[in-house]
C-alpha cells in the first residue's frame, strides 16, 4: 500500500512517498504552486504513476485544534483533488492528518542531521510531508493492531 504525503503551503507543496509496504516514508520533491486545479492534476498524476492507494494531506489546524484560514485553504485544495483521485484506477483515498508542528519536527530532524541552512530551505517542505506521512502510517499501524476500521 503505497501512500503519498502532502504538505500544502501557499507557495509550494512538499511531497513524500511511502515504500510499497507502507512502512517507510521518504521525502520526494517540492512542487511550486500553480493554482488548485493545476496542483491537483499534478498530484493526481503522481498518485497514478506511483500507484498510490492513499493520499494524505496535512491539515494545518490552529494550536487549539480549530480550523483556521490555512486549514480552509487546504480543504479547498482537497475538494478539487478528491474527484481527480476518484477517477484514477484503484481510486486512491484522500484523507487529512493533523500537521501541527510538522515543519518544526522536520526542521529539528534536519538540524540533527547537520543539513546546511541553504539545503534545509530547499527540502523543508518535502521533509514536512515526510513527517506528516510518517505520522499517518504510524496511525494506520496502531489502528490495524487494535483491530479498528476507521481512518
Image (cartoon, rainbow, N blue to C red):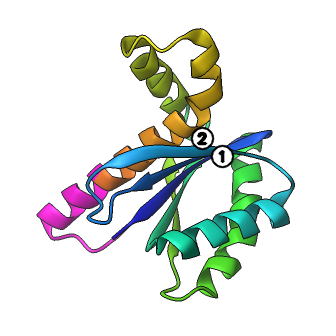
Horizontal side of residue 75 vs 131, given as left or right? right
Q: Secondary structure at mark 2?
A: loop
Q: Tell me if residue 65 is in the magenta stretch.
A: no
Q: Residue at x 38, y 56 (%)?
A: 18
Magenta-highlighted residues: 138-150
Query: Where residue 62 sits in the image (x, y, percent)?
Result: 62, 35
Quarter of the image that includes the N terminus? bottom left
Of residues 97 and 10, the one nearer the viewer is: 10
Of residues 74 and 109, the one nearer the viewer is: 109
Query: Where residue 63 sits in the image (x, y, percent)?
Result: 56, 30
Residue annotated with mark 1: 67
Mark seen at residue 78: none
Query: Where residue 113 sits in the image (x, y, percent)?
Result: 37, 16
Of residues 121 and 55, the one nearer the viewer is: 121
Q: Is residue 88 above or below residue 61?
A: below
Horizontal side of residue 68 vs 126, given as left or right? right
Q: Earlier in the sequence, mark 2 or mark 1?
A: 2
Residue 37 location, quadrant: bottom right
Q: Is residue 91 above or below residue 77?
A: below
Query: Where residue 91 sits in the image (x, y, percent)?
Result: 53, 84
Q: Tell me if residue 140 is in the magenta stretch.
A: yes
Quarter of the image that includes the C terminus? bottom left
Residue annotated with mark 2: 61
| Residue, far right | 35
Tell me if label 2 and label 1 are in contact, CB under 8 Å: yes
Q: Is residue 77 above or below residue 30?
A: below
Residue 129 in view, yes or no: yes
| Dot 1 alpha-carbon crowd within 10 angstroms: few under 14, some 14 to 19, many 20 or more | some
Q: Residue at x 37, y 13 (%)?
A: 112
| Dot 2 alpha-carbon crowd within 10 angstroms: few under 14, some 14 to 19, many 20 or more | some
Amino acid at each position: 500500500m503505497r501512500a503519498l504525503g502532502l504538505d500544502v503551503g501557499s507557495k509550494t507543496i512538499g511531497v513524500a512517498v511511502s515504500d510499497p509496504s507502507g512502512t517507510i516514508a521518504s521525502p520526494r520533491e517540492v512542487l511550486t504552486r500553480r493554482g488548485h486545479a493545476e496542483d491537483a492534476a499534478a498530484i493526481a498524476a503522481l498518485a497514478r504513476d506511483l500507484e498510490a492507494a492513499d493520499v494524505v494531506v496535512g491539515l494545518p489546524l490552529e494550536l487549539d485544534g480549530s480550523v483556521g484560514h490555512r486549514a480552509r485553504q487546504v480543504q479547498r485544495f482537497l475538494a478539487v483533488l478528491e474527484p481527480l483521485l476518484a477517477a484514477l484506477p484503484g481510486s486512491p483515498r484522500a484523507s487529512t492528518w493533523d500537521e501541527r508542528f510538522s515543519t518544526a519536527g522536520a526542521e529539528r530532524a534536519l538540524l540533527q542531521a547537520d543539513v546546511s541552512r541553504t539545503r534545509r530551505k530547499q527540502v523543508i517542505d518535502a521533509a514536512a510531508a515526510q513527517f506528516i506521512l510518517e505520522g499517518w502510517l504510524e496511525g494506520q499501524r496502531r489502528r490495524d493492531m487494535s483491530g479498528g476500521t476507521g481512518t
